[in-house]
Image: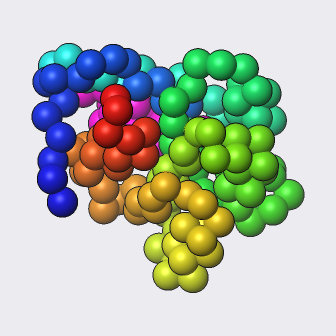
Amino acid sequence: MELIDYEIAHSDIRVLLVEDDPESAALTRTKVSEGKDSPFRVEWTDDLQRALSRLTQPGIDVVLLDFGMLGTGDRTSHPPIKRVVGMRIPVVILTSDESTLSRHLTLGQGAANYLIKRRTSAVELKQALHEAVGPVR
């Protein structure tokens, strides 16, 4: 896997972080935004319905999604997001769920990547987001 030089970012990558835990959200924002000239601009919401509403508007390049948002009425938050964004906006899952089955099913449903929160470094997280939006960025 080739690492991307984030110092040479051509344009901002706008990330919608959907995470219901404020502490996890703050840590994730720090990981994504740290570093000189980081290309990532993060919007955060702790509510799936607000995320779905935001995704009907322009201005988001990639979704960084907590796999199991509370209050979704479902075990996962990925299907509702994918129904709204389809293939036009990639979704990267960042979760505590280490289940191989969950990973397999979610990637099979079109997630761009499936990352485990406690195992993913800032570099790996940025790499996954960059790869999700594609080489054009």
Q: Give the prevailing secondary structure in the magenta stretch.
A: helix
Compared with residue 14, is residue 103 higher up or lower down, i.e. above or below? below
User: Going 42% across and 20% down the picture, which residue do you hit?
Assistant: 41
103 lies left or right of 32: right
Q: Residue furthest right?
A: 73
- Residue 39 position, x and y percent, is 30, 22
- In the image, is residue 92 part of the stretch drawn in magenta? no
- Residue 45 position, x and y percent, is 63, 29
Q: Report the label total.
A: 0
Q: Which of the two residues, 58 or 18, is positioned nearer the viewer here?
A: 58
- In the image, is residue 30 part of the stretch drawn in magenta? yes
User: Going 38% across and 41% down the picture, which residue do you hit?
Assistant: 134
User: Going 55% across and 47% down the picture, which residue do you hit?
Assistant: 91
Q: Which of the two residues, 17 or 14, is positioned nearer the viewer here?
A: 14
- Residue 72 position, x and y percent, is 80, 52
Compared with residue 20, is residue 50 higher up or lower down, i.e. above or below? above
Q: Residue furthest front?
A: 136
Q: Which residues are magenta?
A: 18-34
User: Going 74% across and 57% down the picture, which residue do you hit?
Assistant: 79
Residue 126, quarter of the rendered image:
top left
The answer to whether residue 3 is visible is yes
Residue 21, quarter of the rendered image:
top right
Quadrant in the picture for the C terminus: top left
45 lies left or right of 93: right
- Residue 125 position, x and y percent, is 32, 47
Compared with residue 19, is residue 11 higher up or lower down, i.e. above or below? above
The answer to whether residue 125 is visible is no
Q: Residue furthest bottom?
A: 101
95 lies left or right of 50: left
Quadrant in the picture for the N terminus: bottom left
